[in-house]
Amino acid sequence: MTHSDNQSPHARPDDLVEPVIAEGVDNEPIEDNRRMFRGPLLLGVMLLCIFYSAFHLYTLNIAPLETWAFRIIHVCGASVLGFILFSGRAFAETSTSDRRSRITTWIGLALLIPAIYVLVQTALMQNQLAGGALRIPANIETWHFGWPLVAVTACAIVLSWLHRQPRHQFSVPDLVLAICAVSVASYLVSVFATSIRMSTGTSFAPVGISFAAVAGTMLIFELTRRLAGYALVAIALIFLGYVFVGPSLPGFLSYPGLSVQRFFSQVYTDAGILGPTTAVSSTYIILFIIFAAFLQASKVGDYFVNFSFALAGRARGGPAKVSIFASGLMGMINGTSAGNVVSTGSLTIPLMKKVGYSKTSAGAVEAAASTGGQIMPPIMGAGAFIMAEITGIPYTEIAIAAVIPAILYFASVYFMVDLEAARTGMRGMREDELPVLRRLLRQMYLFVPIMILIGALFMGYSVIRAGTLATVSAAVISWLSPNKMGIHEILKALELAALMSIQIIVVCACAGVIVAVISLTGVGARFSSLLLGVAEASQLLAMFFAMCIAILLGMGMPTTAAYAVAASVVAPGLVQMGIPMLTAHFFVFYFAVVSAITPPVALASYAAAGISGARAMATSVASFKIGLAAFIVPFMFFYNSALLMDGDVLSVARALATALVGVYLLSAGVQAWFLRYAAPWYLRVLLVIAAFLMIEGGLVTDVAGISAGVIAYLVQKWIHARTTIAPQS
């Protein structure tokens, strides 16, 4: 937080005393293993990033490429940038390299020779195919391309684990890995451009495809480890192991089996890495990341946070409520729970501690609020686009259906925060600590790019065209603000977009490997049959089982990957149970999102704990408690589809009203504070029962729930009357 007095030359007298609460929200966070180059190296990487973002804008809007080739290049570009920018291990503390790093550098230089040889071989094979050759001789693919590529990739990965260098230095082992990524992409693009692509998954498939897929999968796993941690890699390895262990497993997990060549010849197809996850990351996700980068370049994030402070800062527990509003607004342009925590939490968490929140509670509130950004239309952390790709349901229909679940999520967190502030007697922030709302209202034009995005989508424009228009409008609108975007700022935004996109692209590719296992082994269908068997005993039990699987799959994984995997494993079974497809996928998506605050592995909570200084597990448990009401919301729209806008206006309005009441009652029961007074244990039980009665959405249960709430209110009044009369008597 900063209280800067810097003013523009044209500042009005009444603005001179206004504190600037938020600055730097749009600044790019620097990861622990991120290299920070200098001089020519920095310029070269900047140009690569700008070219990568510009390439996507050009191909998406002007000159489309063949689908598989475009997706392969998309993953390859992210891999090259990822290996150049992100180290495989911690940086050396000193500016000079030690003896071991010199040894690994020399070994890396030695590995450059076979790596370049493999790259040359891909060019030679490409020339043969372009010259009319029907296939490449198997011995060339095996001994001059396949085995050297796999061996060099494996050796360079291990070498990168051993190599240490200062943050600003270039890594030779990672250069080898970048060259291997280019070799994989070059071979696959040239082979898939011919009729050979039709042979994938058969015994006639060229062996080179399998070698390229093995090396490509190794590269994706290693880069995922560097950017997203071990959790997703571990889950992917378990699924990959199932391909070869599955035939010997008992019961419903057993399947006939796949050979190594047959499986890997299909990994780099639309059944796997080039499937729905990469389809979305190469179009919608990269485009909206560019849009978010343009918004960040014009400092819209600072404005959103300041606007939230001005609106909610004076309320009791004000900074906690600011985090809710700010995270909801930032979720429209950010879309990652941990990213939201870092951008807004660095401001709100210290202020929450200042007004009375403990370190644990402050971090928990920020984690729960930031997680909600994932379900906030219109971007929804890319989940809406993957859902549209998988289900075939139009994006606009998904975005509309997401409105009420988002309202209920943020309402549940707001009620939890407000009731805790009331119970502990917290204050809000003073007026002189907050921005002047009047001045911020004069900058409402900064919302225009988001309004253009929403308007264009509902006018029938494609998502790509709508996103491009919104991006252009962000640059134009910036000229009305102090942060005007010239050529330099536009290039900086394109560079930032490439940096922001690397992690999610790699995560989507890694999730594609898991999707390939699910689709090629049929394990998803077996999970569906298991769900159906459970549903014969109890549909509610089957839903609970599906919830547990979605949360388990999402622990430690980014939401995009968590939803993609859960949608393949769980959602088909829910649909077979007779649940509408949109409801089933929203159910899975919602729990994939809240897995970010579910112990024991809660990424958003861990990020918040790092800022607040609290223990990670304690913060995770506290954020789970704050978001507890949100765990009930998916069951609400399972029982009442009107919460997904499925019904007439009256039924939707009634469903929303009763759901809000139910969420409030549950929050009151959890926080032991109802209306203006503390609630004893028996009243808390009654409030929770009332809340659960309102889940189903039927008239009888709603009336019963409201009646229980009224009884709780009357009992609360009677208790308070007795406690006030007793001292007087």
Image (cartoon, grey):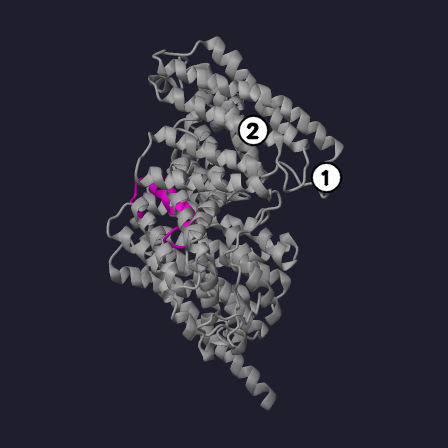
Instruction: Tell me the amino acid under the disc marked 1.
Output: Thr
Where residue 702 sits, quadrant-wise, is bottom left
Q: Residues within 10 Å of mark 2 (few under 14, many from 20)?
A: many
Find disc 1 in the rendering and name its residue: 96
Q: At 45% across and 76% down in the image, what residue appears?
A: 714
Residue that protrudes farthest toward the bottom in the picture: 729
Could you say which is closer to the camera, residue 569 or residue 426? Answer: 426
Where residue 373 sits, quadrant-wise, is bottom left
**In the rendered image, which quarter contains the C terminus?**
bottom right
Find disc 2 in the rendering and name its residue: 177
Q: Is residue 115 visible?
A: yes
Residue 380 shown in magenta: yes
| Residue 75 x/y as whole percent | 45, 33
- Helix, strand or loop at disc 1? loop
Label ID, residue 304: none
Q: Nearer the viewer, mark 1 or mark 2?
A: 1
| Residue 330 x/y as whole percent | 45, 57
| Residue 176 x/y as whole percent | 57, 27
Q: Is residue 532 visible?
A: no
Instruction: Tell me the amino acid under the disc marked 2.
Output: Leu
How many numbered marks are there?
2
Q: CA distance from mark 1 to mark 2?
A: 23 Å
- Helix, strand or loop at disc 2? helix
90 left or right of 141 in image = right
Mark 1 or mark 2: which comes first in sequence?
1
Q: Please, what is the dominant secondary structure of the magenta stretch?
A: helix
